[in-house]
Amino acid sequence: MPEPVPPEPARRGDVTVTACPDGPLLVRGPATILGPDGEPVPRRRATVALCRCGGTAIAPWCDGTHKVNGFRSPEASAGAAG
């Protein structure tokens, strides 16, 4: 069952953004996600995954496409080169 999210963005609380190796950005906490038009994108969960590979069909959310399209995150690629 998804975690409930208040209808109005929270004004307080810790927000963390974690870059998953070769995967999405995980956003935890009361962050407001803005779309390309500058308008807030509705969230259904307290923790969301944002696409970094550019292949998702449900932008801005991750749909797991990075697992099949060969996406390599910059930090993973830099570590492999050194």
Image: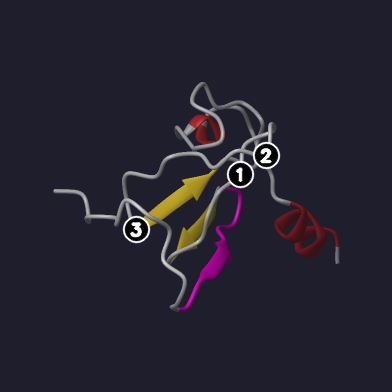
Q: Secondary structure at mark 2?
A: loop
Q: Amino acid at mark 1?
A: Leu
Give x and y (percent) for residue 11: 47, 71
Q: Amino acid at mark 3?
A: Ala
Front position among marks 3 and 2:
2
Q: Are marks 3 and 2 in contact (CB under 8 Å)?
A: no
Q: Is residue 25 above or below residue 52?
A: below
Dot placed on the residue nearer the N-terminal end, 3 or 2: 2
Residue denoted by label 2: 38
The part of the chain drawn in magenta is 14-23
Residue at the image position 29 percent from the left and 55 percent from the top: 5
Residue 17, magenta (yes or no): yes
> How would you rate the neighbour count of disc 3 (Cα within 10 Å): few for under 14, some for 14-19, many for 20 or more?
some
Q: Quadrant of residue 46?
A: bottom left
Q: Are marks 2 and 1 in contact (CB under 8 Å)?
A: yes
Residue denoted by label 3: 46
Q: Main secondary structure of the magenta part?
A: loop
Residue 48 is labelled as: none
Residue at the image position 50 percent from the left and 72 percent from the top: 15
Q: Is residue 46 above or below residue 36?
A: below
Residue 64, magenta (yes or no): no
Residue at the image position 52 percent from the left and 71 percent from the top: 16
Residue denoted by label 1: 34
Q: Quadrant of the C terminus?
A: bottom right
